[in-house]
Image: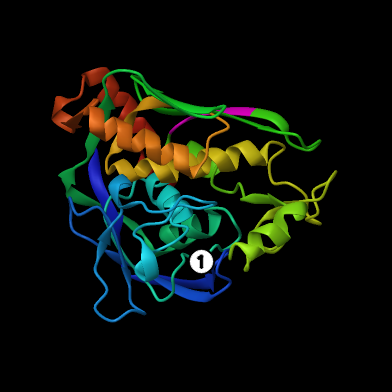
Amino acid sequence: MNLFQRTIRNSTQVTGIGIHSGRRVTMSLHPAPSHSGIHFKRVDIKNSPIMKATALTVGTTENATTLGEGAGAIHTVEHILSALYGLGINNVYIEIDAPEVPIMDGSAASFIFLLKEVGIIQQTASKKFMMINKKIRVEKDDKWATIEPWSHLAVDSTIVFAHPVIKTQRYQLNFSCEEYIKQVSRARTFGFLKDVDMLKRKGLARGGSLDNAIVLDDYHVMNPEGLRYPDEFIRHKILDTIGDMSLLGHELIGKITTYKSGHNLHNILCREILAQENYDILGESQLPEEMKKTLDLRHAMSVF
């Protein structure tokens, strides 16, 4: 088996609402050539630029990851980016007709379904991997995140909330396409009823509901169906982390460990990795044989 780059077989689209803007949005996804990466374009703005999804194009990171700044920014990109990375898709061109990617059910599951339905194809070019060379740690207040050398991508995350349903949760994902789909992709974003008014005053959460987020009152989960995983909260944090770290532009070989982190700290870590040039970009032929075999299995197309 060879580790080839991937795109989608045909164009497809989905319509939903933005969780923060509350606006209806249609997002269209199109196949893209090898080595192009993930690009976004706002089609509701005349002559808007095509924006490559990279860590250095990230603007604000309050409650979501935003590409660009000002009126042309594209908000809440982390879930679609996570789904693309989770399926090993490297090259896609995305058009949206509003400021924000649709939230769907608050997880990556709808995007996984959409991408699998339209079809995923291997391209002729080999994948490129970003292999981390040394450990880097970034901190902000009592929160921190690290990345260090590893044999594959692993994400080990911990969250701490003073809420009886969440408390302290920790989970490690040893990445493979199949494990991502089974263990992480269905985990929904979450928020607290007590914060709703504050968020709306900031122009956030205008489209939030029990249909697209886990909502907690002071003691309970308010969603009638309950949780999809007993520890759905930490699994969603890993979903977000993968989406944010995918903005490095290559598939990662390294272990990410986070404690109480969020979009801002993830972007700080990405920028520090780039600033320190703490990596090698390797093609399949440059990988050690044992690592190549491991990555073959972790990126296997059999799940499709």
Q: Position of residue 172 (x, y in %)?
A: 54, 27
Say left or right for 273 vs 113: left
The percent coordinates of residue 217 (x first, y second) are 81, 50
Question: Residue sitting at 21 percent across and 29 percent down?
Answer: 277
Q: Is residue 272 left or right of residue 14?
A: left
SS of the residue at dot 1? loop
* Visible residue check, residue 212: no
Residue 24 located left or right of residue 226: left
* Residue 1 spot, x, y in % from top left: 25, 35
**Closest to the observer, 299 or 164:** 164
x, y (%) of residue 106? 59, 56
Residue in the image at 30% along x and 18% along y: 134
Query: Label 1 amino acid?
Result: Pro
Above or below — where is 99 with respect to 59?
Answer: below
> Which residue corresponds to mark 1?
102
Question: Which colour scheme appears in the figure?
Answer: rainbow
Q: Nearer the viewer, residue 70 or 289?
A: 70
In the displayed orientation, state which residue is furthest to the right. Answer: 219
Q: Label the magenta part by its dominant secondary structure.
A: strand
Asked whether residue 114 is in view, the answer is yes
Would you say residue 174 sits in the magenta stretch? yes
x 46%, y 42%: residue:
264
Q: Which residues are magenta?
A: 170-175
Name the side, left or right, on which 275 lies relative to 12.
Answer: left
Q: Classify residue 272 by image quadrant.
A: top left
